[in-house]
Image (tube, helix red, strand yellow):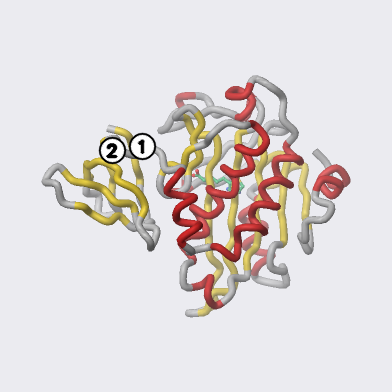
Amino acid sequence: MDLTTIKAHLAGIPIPEIRFFNSITSTNDFALAWAETNAPDMALIIADEQTAGRGRFSRRWLTPPGAALAFSLVIRPSTSEQTCLPLFSPFTGLVISLAIEEITQLKPQLKYPNDILLAGKKCAGILVEAAWQGNQLKAAVIGAGVNVMHHSTPPPGEVLFPATSLEEETGFPLQREELLATILRHFFSWRSRLGTDEFMAAWDQRLAFRGKTVSISLPSGMILSGTVQGIDQEGALLLQLNSGDIRRITIGDVHLRPS
Ligand code: BTN
């Protein structure tokens, strides 16, 4: 992976600035620091290797050299986007799924709120972080990691949820730069639909565990068990509890497991 090849693949996609690193601690860390200064909307940071990649809940995210797609985007959200900021996570899950579908013809599913699954195993994750100045949102940083080659999949002992890679599921080699370009094309094409009914329907259509019983640990430590019904108009997960009541789970810090 190198900057020239990346730029060749991104020709025609309006990315204003790109920073490429053979090795970096975390593309999200670089993006957050850059967001504090002059990073424009849709500035892209991409690395072949991350030595301190981060996942949600401060977990480690492995990005060994030559194996995965790891990138971050700096977003300067418009006023209307600021009203639905948490939706950028599932939004990125959706556009990555669309890109995987386009390239592999496989049908990824979205584990609420934003993990991407193939054959019931995680192949990509998203970490959205915000840069604030007082009450004012300066930027959102969207970080995404996709397990592309076989050796990008973390060892089973390292992960709570089973993992896989695109190559493992397709059986053929894939080019990371092509995947990146396809993701970014979908990102641009869908961005104006963030929060719309069309976006919710596309997300709902790909929702994993529909009709299945799952356990959800809430930030309070409480564990809820119920059957997944779908996504509502505000992006909350609808869970039918054993009592028959429907409980809305909002994006927050949801930690969902099949029971
Ligand atoms: C998760 O599933 O917990 C989220 C994983 C997010 C990983 C990506 S890789 C690029 C960016 N840089 C990081 O340090 N993390 C995100």
Q: Which mark is residue 217?
A: none
Q: For the residue carrying disc 1, how many other residues have a C-alpha within 10 Å: few (<14), some (14-19), or many (20+)?
A: many
| Sequence-first tag of 1 and 2 | 1
Q: For the residue carrying disc 2, how many other residues have a C-alpha within 10 Å: few (<14), some (14-19), or many (20+)?
A: some
Q: Label 1's element? A: loop
In the rendered view, tell whether residue 105 sits above or below residue 10.
above
Q: Residue furthest left?
A: 243
Question: Which residue carries the number 1 mark?
Answer: 209
Tag 1–tag 2 contact (CB < 8 Å): yes
Rendered location of residue 41, percent (x, y): 69, 67
**Residue 233 lies in what quarter of the image?**
bottom left
The answer, for residue 167, to whether it is visible in the render is yes
Residue depicted at x 40% and y 46%: 112
Disc 1 marks a residue whose amino acid type is Phe
Mark 2 residue CB less than 8 A from any atom of ligand 1 = no
**Residue 20 placement, left or right of 244:** right
Residue depicted at x 65% and y 70%: 36
Residue depicted at x 67% and y 57%: 30
Residue depicted at x 70% and y 39%: 49
Question: Which residue carries the number 2 mark?
Answer: 214
- State which quarter of the image contains the N terminus: top right
Disc 2 marks a residue whose amino acid type is Val
Front-most of 239 and 150?
Answer: 239
